[in-house]
Structure formats: structure tokens, C-alpha cells
Image (cartoon, grey):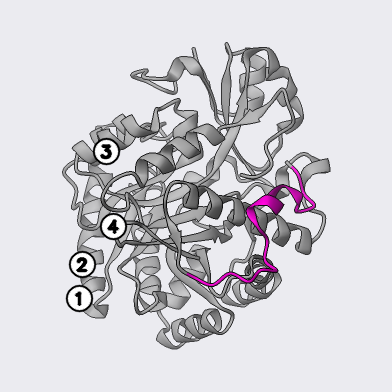
């Protein structure tokens, strides 16, 4: 789905496919027919954007096989799908029964992470629509914060120099520019915008920048306009935005989170006291998972790194960080040009929502994703972007977004 900023920039909106467990090309193609095409049809859109997730083995195979890349692009095109961005944060097995801290490995101190990311860039260069200005790949914010020392920081910095050189080589060979965005996340070396400035300043900002996940931004208790100003002042571009919301719990409501504890993903929890703290992960106001926060009885209110559907917040007394999302979108698109041209709706947690709230069928999951995209599209129109593609009157409208058959 494409929109236009008043300054003339095209803004791409899609959904991230890391919600699906496909690990090879055959699985990816099945996923397109099972989910992506029904989502596009439900929206009545001529063209649907995907933030494609390719596990490392699939990325390596595609990077080594030009014919396979041409086939994948053709399969996308015939289905009315396009790809301008890839999610390169999870390396593999992202929908395994237990993921937790494994998602941060391999990290940016290793050659494996560099090779994977450059494979993604090579693949994306051949998938990009002819009229796309550039591509983007999101990746982890260097590493989990422990262990981390000067030697590991130096190793990561060398990998990032090699990444910049590799992206330049991809552009020379293909004529297509691909940028990589490091995604601040609770518990990692880079959690806040201030830590992003400290860790990433001085890089090749023509090719490297930040992927801003709006749920993560909320969990850091950052004010969006101020965080964006801080990044802009440091010269760090926002190369991608993940349009997401986290759970918010008032102080008196934190016990209601007990039924949201689940075994697959980490749900880092931050109390309001982490706002502006030198160490946002200080255990005085932070825990690395929801069950740990409940056991520690952190002071409330809390924000929990648990992506919930945009259009369907948890039942009261819980809520979502939707106001942070709205403030961030307003700040991103208030200027003379678009603050970012690649946006992905990234709710990868549909399969671990409390049982009464999770989709029971593939069709219900597709309907939920379509409702989220309709909601996100309406939010972007509300901050002044203009749709550029035809949308059939039979498609899901923003008013239908809460009636998709799945609540959260």
C-alpha cells in the first residue's frame, strides 16, 4: 500500500511476515497464498506491501541463486505484492515453541550476522519495484546488553564498517540502494534513542541508520518528538518504522497481566521510572520478562514489550500504547518531507495472545492482519498522507477494523 506525503515523497506501508513460520522458499510461497493474498483482497487494494522475513538459510540460498530471486519477484508481482523492506532481526526459527533470548544471536560481533544481512541486501536489490527509491533491512541493535565490553564493542564496530562497504558494493553491482536500520529494543545494548546516538554516531549514514519500532519507543517511556529530534540532531536517519503498540498497565492493574505470561517470546517490562534514566534496564524499574516483573512487583505503571493488534487493545484495566504511536506518526510526517518512507505493521505475537484472543484459523489471522493494516492506513491519512492506490469499496474500512472476528 502506498501513500503520498504533501512534500511529494512516496510512503510504503506493509505488514511484516515474521508472524508466519516459513523458513524456506517453498514455505514463503505458500505463505503468500495463505495470508498475503487474502489480506490484500480483504483490503480491496491493488498492491500490498510485505516486510518480508527470510530466515538465514533461505536468504543465503536466494543470494546465491539469481534465478530463484527472479522467480520470487515474479511470484510476488503476479499476486499484487511488493517488497521494499526486509526484516533481518530474527536469524532463524522465530516462531519456534521457545525463542526468548535466542533472537539476539548471532549478534553484530559475529561474521554470521554480517553475512546474513548482506545476503538480505543482495536479495532485496532484486526484489525492489523499479520505481522504489531504495530498500531497507531492519536488524538487531548490536547485541543483548550482557555480556558487553570494549572488546565486543570494537568487534561490532568493525562489522558495521564491513557492512557499509558491502552495501556500497551491492549498490555498485545492482544500481539499487539498500539501507540497514538498527532497531532499539528493551534489554539490548541500544534500548533508547540516547543510546542509539551514543552507539551509532559516526557511522556511514548514507547506508546505516535506525529502525524505529514504536512499541519499543513506548516501552522506553520516550516522548516521540524528542526522540526523533535527538536522532535528527545526531544525523541518524530513520530508515524504517515498525508500526506497533505495546501493553500499558496502570499501577493498580499490573496483576491483570498474569494471563499474558507465555513461553515463546521475551516480554521486557519497564516502569515509568526508566524514562530518562541513564540505564533503562536498571532493575529498580525494569525486568527482562513479564513473569520476572510480576515476581519483583515493580512499581507501576508498566509498559510491556508485548506487541498487541493495533485495532484491538487489551480489555480494561489494561490498555495499549496507541497514543505514543499517534504522536510518533504526527512527528514523523509534520515536516516538509516524510520522516520515513518505509513502514511495517509488525505484530508477530498473534499466535501467543491469550487463548480466547488468538486466531483459530488461517482465515482469522489474515482478517486480523487486514484489520490492522486498515487501521494503520487510516492513522496515516489522519496525519496528512494521501492514498495513491485504488481501494475497492468492498475492502476492509477503518471502521471495520475492530470487527475482524479477532480481538486482543
- Residue underneath mark 2: 168
Would you place residue 400 above or below residue 276 in this image?
below
Q: Position of residue 153 (x, y in %)?
A: 27, 38
How far apart are the alpha carbons under marks 2 and 1?
6 Å
Q: Position of residue 152 (x, y in %)?
A: 29, 39
How far apart are the alpha carbons under marks 2 and 4?
28 Å
- Residue underneath mark 3: 231
Would you place residue 22 above or below residue 198 in this image?
below
Q: Secondary structure at mark 1?
A: helix
Q: Secondary structure at mark 4?
A: loop
Q: Residues within 10 Å of mark 3 (few under 14, many from 20)?
A: some
Q: Which mark is residue 7?
A: 4
Q: Secondary structure at mark 3?
A: helix
Q: Is residue 361 left or right of 194 when viewed as pictured?
A: right
User: Which-is-in-front pick, marks 2 and 4?
Assistant: 4
Disc 3 to disc 4: CB gap under 8 Å:
no
Q: Position of residue 57 (x, y in %)?
A: 50, 68
Kindly identify the residue that appears in the image at 66 percent across and 19 percent down: 294
Q: Earlier in the sequence, mark 2 or mark 4?
A: 4
Residue 400 lies within the magenta run: yes
- Residue underneath mark 1: 172
How far apart are the alpha carbons under marks 4 and 1?
29 Å
Amino acid at each position: 500500500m502506498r501513500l503520498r506525503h504533501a512534500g511529494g515523497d512516496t510512503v510504503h506501508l506493509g505488514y511484516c511476515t515474521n508472524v508466519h513460520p516459513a523458513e524456506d522458499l517453498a514455505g514463503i510461497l505458500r505463505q503468500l497464498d495463505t495470508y498475503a493474498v487474502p489480506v490484500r483482497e480483504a483490503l480491496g487494494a491493488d498492491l500490498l506491501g510485505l516486510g518480508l522475513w527470510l530466515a538465514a538459510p533461505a536468504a543465503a540460498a536466494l543470494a546465491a541463486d539469481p534465478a530463484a530471486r527472479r522467480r520470487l519477484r515474479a511470484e510476488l508481482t503476479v499476486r499484487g505484492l511488493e517488497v521494499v523492506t526486509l526484516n533481518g532481526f530474527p536469524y532463524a526459527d522465530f516462531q519456534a515453541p521457545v525463542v526468548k533470548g535466542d533472537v539476539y544471536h548471532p549478534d553484530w560481533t559475529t561474521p554470521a550476522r554480517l553475512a546474513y544481512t548482506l545476503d538480505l541486501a543482495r536479495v532485496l536489490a532484486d526484489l525492489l519495484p523499479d520505481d522504489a527509491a531504495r530498500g531497507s533491512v531492519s536488524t538487531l541493535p548490536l547485541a543483548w546488553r550482557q555480556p558487553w565490553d570494549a572488546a565486543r564493542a570494537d568487534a561490532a564496530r568493525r562489522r558495521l564498517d564491513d557492512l557499509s562497504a558491502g552495501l556500497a558494493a551491492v549498490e555498485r553491482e545492482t544500481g539499487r540502494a539498500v539501507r540497514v536500520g538498527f532497531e532499539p529494543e528493551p534489554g539490548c545494548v541500544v534500548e533508547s534513542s540516547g543510546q542509539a546516538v551514543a552507539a551509532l554516531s559516526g557511522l556511514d549514514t548514507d547506508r546505516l541508520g535506525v529502525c524505529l519500532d514504536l512499541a519499543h519507543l513506548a516501552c522506553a517511556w520516550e516522548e516521540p518528538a524528542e526522540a526523533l529530534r535527538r536522532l535528527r540532531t545526531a544525523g541518524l536517519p530513520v530508515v524504517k518504522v515498525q508500526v506497533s503498540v505495546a501493553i500499558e498497565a496502570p499501577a493498580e492493574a499490573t496483576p491483570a497481566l498474569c494471563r499474558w505470561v507465555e513461553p515463546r517470546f521475551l516480554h521486557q517490562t519497564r516502569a515509568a521510572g526508566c524514562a530518562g534514566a541513564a540505564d533503562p534496564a536498571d532493575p529498580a524499574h525494569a525486568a527482562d520478562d513479564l513473569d520476572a516483573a510480576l515476581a519483583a512487583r515493580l512499581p507501576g505503571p508498566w509498559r510491556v514489550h508485548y506487541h498487541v493488534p493495533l485495532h484491538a487493545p487489551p480489555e480494561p484495566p489494561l490498555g495499549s500504547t496507541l497514543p505514543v504511536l499517534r504522536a510518533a506518526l504526527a512527528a514523523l510526517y509534520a515536516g516538509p518531507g516524510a520522516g520515513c518512507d518505509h513502514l511495517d505493521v509488525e505484530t508477530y505475537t498473534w499466535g501467543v495472545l491469550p487463548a480466547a484472543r488468538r486466531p483459530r484459523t488461517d482465515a482469522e489471522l489474515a482478517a486480523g492482519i487486514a484489520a490492522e493494516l486498515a487501521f494503520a492506513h487510516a492513522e496515516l491519512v489522519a496525519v496528512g498522507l494521501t492514498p495513491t492506490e485504488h481501494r475497492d469499496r468492498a475492502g476492509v474500512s477503518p471502521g471495520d477494523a475492530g470487527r475482524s472476528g479477532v480481538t486482543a
